[in-house]
Image (spheres, grey):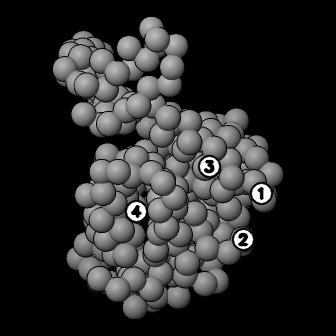
Amino acid sequence: MERKFVNYVVEDRLAVVTIDNPKMNALSVPVVEELGAVFDELETRTEIGVAIIIGGGTRAFVAGADIKGFKDLLGKRDVVFNGARGMQNVFTKIERSRLVVIAAINGLALGGGCELAAACDIRVAGDNVIIGVPEVKLGLIPGAGGTQRLVRLLGKGRAKLMVLTGDFFSAQDALQMGLVEKVVPAADVLAEAKKLAGTILGNAPLAVEAGKRAINEGVEMSLDDGLVFEAGFVGDLFMTEDLKEGASAFVEKRFPVFKRK
């Protein structure tokens, strides 16, 4: 499909995905659809191991939904429900992607922007970032997975602090809460995300994919079931050529050459 708002460039095994919907990169229906299509495409490109999501320009990562359109949806429960489910499905696709997805948060990340960041694996924020889910100030709650992902990231108390106050939080507040993993100068956000991507891409691809799945899916299980789930991945990885290469390279004191096999 021809894309107007979401595109990506590939740098070796890294895809940099840019959401560019001026002025504030609002999550319109076409933006969400294009974002889903991009990740469908990236999923099939097995040479790519990491994706960075960043907002176009410097003002916003993503500044939520287009509020001007809300008046046309009043009284249309089924339409709104289906719209929320559509956005949730795209964000879940990102969360469950084979790729490691890094949010490079530049500027405002409000509402759906915060929810999109929460669906990513790792979040790097500029020191000028303002982040939050202010939907209650409009009479809503987060509807793109925010109430569910924030509680898993932050715990009940901090998730309720965000959702029920609708307050905005600084980058340092978000770091202290555990909402982002790194804060860097605003001008360095993409460079830091790429540096992090490079570290991840230097590791065995199948092991990285297994680690992501073990964490994402195991956290929904009991500890006993999660341990069995983890052990299954360990056993599977011992069947790979990459583990043989990694162990040999370690013994021979050289850099491994992984082939995702």
Q: Which residue lies furthest to the top in this view?
A: 251
Q: What residue type is labelled 1?
A: Ala
63 lies above or below 71? above
Nearest to viewer (mark 2 / mark 3): 3
Quadrant of image for the N terminus = bottom left
The tag earlier along the polypeptide, 4 or 1, is: 4
Could you say whether the residue bearing mark 3 is in a helix, strand or loop?
Answer: helix
Residue 105: percent from left, percent from top:
63, 57
Q: Are marks 4 and 3 in contact (CB under 8 Å)?
A: no
**Relative to residue 200, is residue 81 drawn left or right?**
left
Task: Report if the CB atoms under discs 1 and 2 are less than 8 Å apart.
Answer: yes
Q: Give me the residue at 23% from left, 76% from top.
A: 78
Is the residue 230 above or below the residue 208 in the image? above
Residue where numbered disc 2 is placed: 58
From the top left corner, tell me how far across and down residue 143 is, in percent.
40, 62
Residue 173 is left or right of residue 204, and the answer is right
Which of the two marks, 4 or 3, is nearer to us in this view? 3
Q: In this view, does 5 lie to the left or right of 189?
A: left
Distance (Cα) linking label 4 and label 1:
28 Å
Tag 3 near tag 1, CB within 8 Å: no
How far is mark 4 from mark 3, CA to CA? 27 Å
* Residue kind at label 4, given as amino acid type: Gly
Identify the mark at residue 143; answer none if there is no mark: 4
For the residues marked 1 and 2, what is the alpha-carbon distance in whole angstroms? Answer: 9 Å
Q: Residue at x 66, y 56 (%)?
A: 190
Badge 1 is on which residue? 186
Q: Which of marks 2 and 4 is in front?
A: 2
Q: Earlier in the sequence, mark 2 or mark 4?
A: 2
Of the two numbered discs 2 and 3 on the same chain, state the one appearing first in sequence. 2
